[in-house]
Every structure is written in structure tokens, then in C-alpha cells.
Amino acid sequence: MALLELDRLSVGLVTEHGDRELVHELSLDLAAGRTLCVVGESGSGKTVTALSIIRLLEFVAPVRTSGQIRFDGEDLTGLSPDRMRGYRGRRLGMIFQEALDSLNPAQRVRRQLVECYPRHLREQAEAKARALLTEVGLTDTERVLNLYPHQMSGGMQQRVMIALALMSDPDLLIADEPTTALDVTTQAEILALFDRVRRDHGTACVFITHDMGVAAQVADRIAVLYRGKLVEIGDRDEVLTAPSHPYTRALLACVPQLGVSRREGFPTISEALLDKGEVATETLVLPPHEHPVDGAPLVVDGVSKVYGRSGRSLRAVDEVSLEIAPGEFFGLVGESGSGKTTLGRMISALETPTSGTISFGAHRCTPKGLLGSEREFRRATQLIFQDPQSSLDPRHTAARIIAEPLRELIGLRGSELDSRVTELIAEVGLPADTAGKLPAQLSGGQRQRVSIARAIAAEPSLIVADEPTSALDVSVQGQVMNLLLHLRRTRTLSLLFITHNLSLVLSVADRVGVMYRGELVEVGEPEQIRLAPRHEYTRRLLAANPELPRLPEPGLLNR
Amino acid sequence: MTRLLLRRLRDLLVILVVVGTMMFFVIRLIPGDPALAILGPTARPADVAALRSAMGLDGSLWEQYLSWAGHVLHGDFGSSITYHQPVLGVVLEHIPPTLTLAVLSSVISFLLSVAVTSWYAVSPRNPLARALDRLSALGMAIPDFWISLVLVLVFSVTLRWLPSSGYHSLFTDPVQALPALVLPLVVLVIGQTALFVLTLRESMLGELPLAYLRTARAKGLSESRVMLRHVLPNALMPLITQLGSNFAMLVGGIVIIESIFVIPGLGHLLMGAVSTRDFPLIQGVTLFVALLFVLVNLLVDLSYAAIDPKVRVS
């Protein structure tokens, strides 16, 4: 018998205007000891499904559930809150995405681990905590038990979280994007650890992820959700290599892969085609290069950035030199703490280097600051940030956001300004009525288009884009990348593209630089980096990169 | 920690200099001549002039200020005009009643507000808990002089259970002191508890959507344990800030309560000093209140370090 069975589970959010359905008649099952990956993009209902199984959603939102969730034969939806509590933490364990946020910031690890045990079993609980911490690779148990969450690295926090979920030997683990916030090398470690621990304990697992590469590594079976509905479920290899549903095929085609060039554009998912039940990927045709590529290169010469004073200083960027040619797409890849963002901020003169100079045409960034007119520099260099949610003023309309650089840097006013804003909104592929909307009224992809429109408004010759797609779904990521590729062909524009996503950057950039602990350890063309990496760290990154089994080319999918 | 203390010590000096200087000039804007106030309208101009000179009120404003500042630096705050005693002694004499009221009412209000809020958080459906929680808005809205008068009317005038005024030291004469303290304390506690409940509830609401509570529930903890062990302790921070600034306000500002219940505290002293144009005394009291204000806030900062592990580390 299956350990977990969802039988026509529907979850609706109760609002003033009636219920809004988040999950629609979802049926699936999971045998004891097996792993089911639930894959989907944002809004697919995958997290809602996970939280509904353990019934945590009802604490934060008014929800109505219909259908059954049978766990070991018992329907969880019908249990009283008290009886449900008996399942949580005892038979059902949960691991969350943001380990730091998911641990109490003001309590030590010890207290959080042993908390679910009754008081008279505290000694037993502590022995168990030590055993589990050792098992998840934190062998220095005494020290770890006394730490607060913020004193640990992201990887350590997630290990503690896994230990926490295993404290009461649950039969079923629910993991909601447990590695999404981690670096690829840490992600690879945690996934391997997770798989080992899960097998040793014989625990079944519902693993929620948006990343097909991750699903390929951990799943026995894969379920694909789209807009709250199950579109496909099957064994891992079947779903990954011979997907039956057009959406699954489209989703797989959108994932950037090593060795697949996307310089002529990314495939994206067409909802219109999908609704007709047809092949759902579209590939846009990029215009030919219209602009002669000229102008000055960006030259970074021996730049370092040191934070803190001597004694406890941190070399965030260490003697980095590189050159970006006019019109070049330069990808800078590295993990958190590698100094890639700091380098980007120095190139865009948001930070001054501790030593070295950055020159771009007539502009110089030196340890003394930016030489010359800042206004001229800002016209030439613009930024796109990672999180369009927090980098746009929530109280400004899209039109006002896009108009600001036009007014401040170029001095446009009146009808000229308005018509330029309208043009820009059309150029980044947004509907005309976007102009009057606030960031909160736009989707993630639309917000990032607004950021891009704002960045190109002053017609810069260099854009520093810091993780512009990492907060977006893969299909939306494709759209935003296509926009950047398109803009590069219609304007004279160099791009410094900062990312942690190796597959993505290798598939589009002209050249790629790899940063590690403040140093630029390797620069080369994508093929050279992929096939003949020179630095040990690059090899580690490539090895940790989650990959899909070889798929038919997107062209072949368009049968 | 040492750096924090040194920085605060520097701030303290700056604040005292600014407050002292401002008060010195501001009170001289009040119309009325202290010498004339003492000697009465029939005094001869010569006597008035002599007294002014004896009080350090002759010469230009600058000369007065420099001579006053010089004395203060030597620990001499001058003599009170009305009490005919050194200012320092007068101020110290009036501190105990104010401090008694401030400390007692703060502690009681803190405990009460935590109790009410926790009760409501654990059993939100209990009608009494909900009523107490909702009453806090009312407690904020009613002016304390009105509550004072109603309480005096009911418990002192009509029922004759409690004295309507007076003060005895809690340490030397507790039997007499306690009944007289009840009414002023109740008035102060009502206002403060209301404020604290609102602060704490706001802060707890801010904690509720945070992800670590989801983890706590995923462990299978009961709602009351989630509230008492996770939400409440982490929500206390803003209340401690509130407690500190409120305490400092109390010390300088229980004027109304002290006047109504005839309690010889700092507020009472300051009121009298202002109406008699007792310049040295006004300056002494304000300097002392400023000092207390800064010290209490330092205490609050230090308690952060004790409570919040993040502050402790950095």
C-alpha cells in the first residue's frame, strides 16, 4: 500500500471574492522509502501541495481543502488540530528553503533540536541531536549545538535543518526547495547528503523543486505541476527523456544546458499554444547585428577591494584585471562570497576600489573615487539588479521609474519624455498599459523588463547585470535573456553579466570569467571553459552543476 | 562593549552641555524678574539691584552664562532662590518619590502587559482576554488627570478607602506609604500598560509571518508553546525600547500626577520652581532629568546586548 496518497486534493484560498483555487484535483501516491519530486514553476501549486500535506498552510492563510490526503491509511484532512499535531514532527518532517529564516534567530541550535522532545527525555534528545549532527557532517557537535543560526554558513544551516527534521525519525520527509538558496557546490553536497541520510533511515520523501536538474538527481518519480494541476507523473527517466505532456517538454527545453548554445535565442513557453494542447516552445528570431561595434573597452586593472581594518580585513576582490570589448557579452560566474558582486559594484562606481583603477573611455574609477562627471558616467554605465521586487520603488509607477534616468541624466521633459517612455516600454516587450502600474501589480518577469527599460533609457554603452534572472522561473528567464540578446543586437552595448548559473552563462556569453575567493581564476570562451577548464575550482563547479540527462534537441521536439 | 560605553559617555557630555545651555537661555525668556518676585512689588530699586547682583543676575547674558557654566563645572549648581539651599541638595531630596513611582509603575506595567498579551495570544477566543486586549486602546485615549480625579472621587471621597494625597517613604514607613501610593500608581499603570500592550501586540504581529514559526509548528509544537517559546521572547525587543524611553519620560514628566496627589517629587519641584522663577533650581532639575534620560537609554542598549545574540556577536 502507498504510504501517502493524495486523492483529488483541491486547495482554495478563501478571499472576499470567493475561493481562488491554488491546487486542482491533484491525485498522486508515494510508496514508503521512495522519493517523489514535484516540479513546477512559481504559481504551479507545488509549495501549496507540500504545506497542505503537513497542514501548515492553515496557520498563515484561510484555506479550504477538499479531497483526501491519506497518510498510512488515515485521512489527514479530517483530523482535529490536536491529532494533526501528533503527526507533525513525529511521522511527518519538513525541510524548508531558507534555512536561516526557518530557524529561530534568538535560540541556540541545541534548544531548537531538542525542543520537540518531552522534558524528561531531554538527555536522550541531546544524544540523538549529536548523532544526527555527526551524520549530516557537522562532526564538531558540541560547538555547533551552542551556535546561533546566523553564526553558521548557509550549508551548515541547511544541515542543521535536515537534522532537525530527522529528530523524531519521521516516515515521510517533505522538502520544499531545500537547496535553492545554496551555491552549486554546496547544493551538490547537500543533495548527496540528503539522499544518503534518506536511504539510511528508509524515509519516504516529497521533494519540491523548480529545478529539473535537481529533480534528475534525487527523484525516483517526478510529478509535474502546471497552474495547480498535475500534467504528468511517472518514473524519473521516463519523464526526463520521454516526456508525454507538451508542458513538460517545453519546461525541459527551457533549462539551460552545458554544451547547448543559446546565443541565437532561448526557447520560451507559449501559454497560448499550451492551452491548445500543442507543442509549447517558441524560439524567437533575433535581428541581425545592426550597429557597428565601436567605442572604448572597459579596462579593469589590478583592482582590489578590502573591507574592514587591518587585522580583521577581508579581501573581497583581489588584484583582478580584465578587459571587456565594446559590444561584448562578458559572463562573470562565481559562488556567494566570491567577490563577483563587489567587482560589479566597483565597475559601476557604487564602490571605490581599495587599489587599482577601472577605466571606461574617459571615465576613471580610482581609490580616490570617480574622476570626472558622475552624470556622464551614469549615462554610459547602468545596472540591473537581481531582485526587481526590492530594487524598484514600490510607490512609483513603471512610467515614472523609466522616466527618471531620462529626466535626470538626459534632461528630457514634457511630451518628448512621455513619448520616449512609451517607446521604451514597447521596446522591452511590455504592454502599453504597464506605464501606469506599480511594481506590485506586475509579474516578476515584467518587473525585470521595467528594470531593463530603466537601464537602457539613458542609452548606456555598458550594462552591469547582477543575477538579473536568478529570481525568475526558467521560462521567464528565457524571455529576459532573449530581451538582453535582442538589445545587444540593436544597440551598441557591452554586458557584464554576473551570475552563479554556470549552464546559463556558458550558453550565451562571448567570454566567461570565473571568480573564486576574490580572485579571477580563469577567463576564456565558453567552449574552452567547459571542455578544457584550467583551474581546479572551475572543474569543481562543472562537476557540481546539476545536469539533465541528454535530451533531444529542441528542434526535434517540434515534431 | 567598551567602545559602546565610551561613545555613550561622549554623547552624555554633549547632551548635558546642549540641554544646560538651552535651558539657561530659554528660562531667561520667561517674563518676570526673580529678584522682584522675591522682594515683592513694593521693594526699593536699590535692594532689587543688590539682590540681582547677589544672585548672579547682573551683567550681560554672556557673562551670566559663563559664570554659571564655570560654577557647574566645579560641581556648584548654585543656590535655590526659594529653598535657600544648594540646588543639588534640593534635587536629591525630591528624587525618591518620583523614582519610586516611576520604577514601580514601569515594572508593574511591563509584567501586566506581557501577561495580558500572552494570555490573549494563547487563547484568542477567551472573551476576557480579548476584552483586556481591546481595552488597551481605551487606556491610551483617556487622559490621566481625568482617571485620577475619578479615582479620587470614588475611592477617597465617597468610599474613603484610600487617602487622596500625601507621600511617605516606602523604606522608612511602608505601612503609611503603601495606601497613598495606590491611586497614583494605578493611574500611571493604566496608561503605560495600554501603551505596552499595543507595542507588544504590534511587534508580535510582525513576528507571526516569519518562517521560523512554520518550523516550530512543523516540529509538532502546540500553538501555546509556539507563542510563549518563540513569538513572545522574540517580540520583546521593541517593548524594552518603549520601556526605556517611557521611564525617562516618567522621571521628568509625572508633573500632573504629582500635583494632583501632592507628591513632593521632581515634577512637583519643577512646577514650583517655574512659577517662582527659581532659575538655578530649574536648571538643576532639567540637567538631572537629562542625565537620567541618557543613563536609562544606555541601560536599554546594554540589555539589547544581553537579549539579542546578534547584537552580542557584533
Image: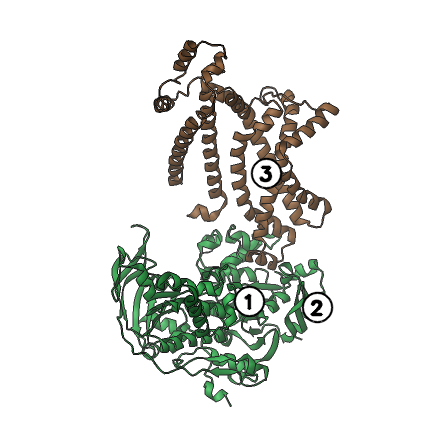
Which quadrant holds the N terminus of chain A? bottom right
Give chain B's shade: brown
**Residue type at tag 1:** Ala
- Is the C-beta separation of discs 2 and 3 under 8 Å? no
Q: Are marks 1 and 3 on the same chain?
A: no
In this view, the mark in front (2 or 1): 1
- Residue found at the far right of this picture: B159
- Up the image or down, A395 lies above or below B169; here it is below
- Is the C-beta separation of discs 2 and 1 under 8 Å? no
Foreground of the two, A295 or A258:
A295
State the residue at coordinates (66%, 32%).
B147
- Crowd rating for badge 3 (residues with CA inside 10 Å; few <14, some 14–19, many 20+): some
Could you give the CA–CA distance between mark 2 and mark 3, rounded to whole angstroms? 46 Å
Answer with left or right where residue A396 lies relative to residue B9: right
- Crowd rating for badge 1 (residues with CA inside 10 Å; few <14, some 14–19, many 20+): many
Answer with left or right where residue B187 lies relative to residue A467: right
Residue identifier under label 2: A74
* Marker disc for residue B110: 3
Could you give the CA–CA distance between mark 1 and mark 3, rounded to whole angstroms? 41 Å
In this view, the mark in front (2 or 3): 3
State the residue at coordinates (50%, 88%).
A558
Residue identifier under label 1: A175
Q: Chain of mark 2?
A: A
Q: Is residue A316 visible?
A: yes
**Residue type at tag 2:** Glu
Could you give the CA–CA distance between mark 2 and mark 1, rounded to whole angstroms? 21 Å
Q: Chain of mark 3?
A: B
Q: Are marks 2 and 1 on the same chain?
A: yes
Chain for colour green: A
Element type where label 1 sits in the image: strand
